[in-house]
Image: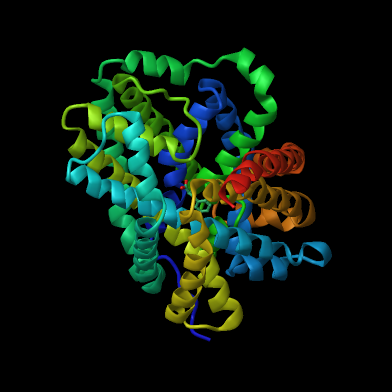
Amino acid sequence: MAQRESWATRTGFILAAVGSAVGLGNIWRFPFQVGQEGGAGFVLIYLLFIALIGFPVMLAEFVIGRRTELNPVGAVKQLAAGRFRYAGWLFFTTGFLILSYYSVVAGWTFRYVLLGLQNDYVADVAGAEQQFLSVASGLDAVLFHALFMLAIIVIVGFGIRRGIELAVKVMVPAIIVIMIGMAIYAFTLEGSGEAYAYYLSPDFGYIGSEWQNILPAAAGQAFFTLSLGMGVMITYASYLGEDRNLAEDGLIIVGFDTFIALLAGLVVFPIFFSAGVNPGSPGAGAVFVTLAAAFGEISFGGLIGAIFFFTVAIAALSSAISILEVVVSYLIDEHGMDRLSATTIISVVIFLVGLPTTYDIVVLDLYDKLVNDILLVSGGFLIALFVGWEISDFAIDELEQGIGDLGSWGIAWLWLLRIPAVIGLLVVVLLGISGYYDFLTGDFAGWLEQTV
Ligand code: PHE
């Protein structure tokens, strides 16, 4: 078997992981979740999940990947006995499913870049909604979904160093710089003060009455945005090849991701408020509709919108390649396929699985909720249980490689995984399942009835 690939540099690994973390989750999903879940209270709970559960789980994934130097399915199989042996399959399935609709949404963003360049955003919300429907469904959506998949096939096909590492070295710095620029621009807009107040001051009454919805949404968002719970970080760490300080790397990655998510709020909400559109309109399409309407309203909106959506599009690219790499690494490691055929074949299947979501946004919601509210958090739950309880002795030992004696920090890490992560995530999974059931029997059933 050919020698396994590895990152060329430490920055390469960190940029790839930041590139994976920073994506549609930060710039599309985060603001629409904040809007839907009532503003700053959601942000607060989300931050708690990031720090207390997300970060420890990320380190757990790193440890599994670096120790085994394998794809998630193979890694779990190698380390686990008995009941955990097959947990890796959950990661494979989740990755597969995420990418199938992630690519569709990413396709919309490319389409919105073009609309901006043609100065075609529609200023009133009803018109913008019509426009969104034509972008998000039908032939256009399929076409851009296909183009996006093609782009990531090319990058992942070139492999770790010449594909992924090279791409993220250009994309990640660009994303960070443009987003900072956009936030400064948004600050100058009329109404930005009101927007910051909405975004940054939590309403504890609302948290108290809506916690059953806010908790799973915030936990799912934390996992989604950090690319956790489906083996991306296992896979990326499996290409490390040498020992270095994973805790430090993890802090940098979590730090950048959180920074960009919070920054995205500072960009999006002032734009909403200045154009007088409602930030709380729910649904996966809302951010596109409201933003496009807002860009249609403000001066130079076409150009600014094009730059904004372009940033979202490259952020989506640098995330999507990490999801594809999970699935591809499995086919290479476990089935001895060559990289290019693995990448191409699996991408065609993923493309097909994503097609139903181009039919109607409700189908996309069906995928997204399943992934976010149930699958990712279930994956995180299994990782916490596995690393915290099953392989804890050598997990600490592995984390200490490249750091040195962790002392009580190591113990704290383990106990965060063992109790808060395991119990918290279990609760969240159960709430997620019940919420999903409500969605299936409510909104989704209603939609089905209307359509067929
Ligand atoms: N973290 C990515 C984002 O925020 C999405 C993602 C989820 C990527 C899971 C990989 C795995 O857009």
Give the left or right position of residue 344, taking residue 184 as reference.
right
Query: Which residue lies at the image location 47% right of the left edge and 72% below the top edge?
Result: 348
- Along the horizontal axis of the image, is 427 left or right of 66? right
| x, y percent for residue 417 | 71, 43
Residue 146 point in image, percent of width and height:
38, 65
Name above or below for residue 304 compared with residue 98: above
Q: Position of residue 242 (x, y in %)?
A: 50, 64
Name which residue lies at 62% across and 39% down. Answer: 443
Whether 271 is drawn above or below 168: the answer is above
Q: Quadrant of residue 120?
A: top left
Q: Quadrant for residue 194, please give it.
A: top left
Q: How is the image coloured?
A: rainbow
Indicate left or right for 378 with 70 as reference.
Answer: right
| Number of numbered discs | 0
Farthest residue toward the right? 82
| 374 in relation to 299, above or below | below
Residue 94, visible in the rendered structure: yes
**Residue drawn at (42%, 40%), measured in percent from left and top?**
28
Which residue occupies the foreground of this view, 49 or 342? 342
Left/right placement of residue 380 relative to residue 145 reads right
Tell me, yes or no, if residue 14 can be seen here.
no
83 is higher (above) or lower (below) than 381? below
What is the x, y in percent for residue 2?
Answer: 49, 84
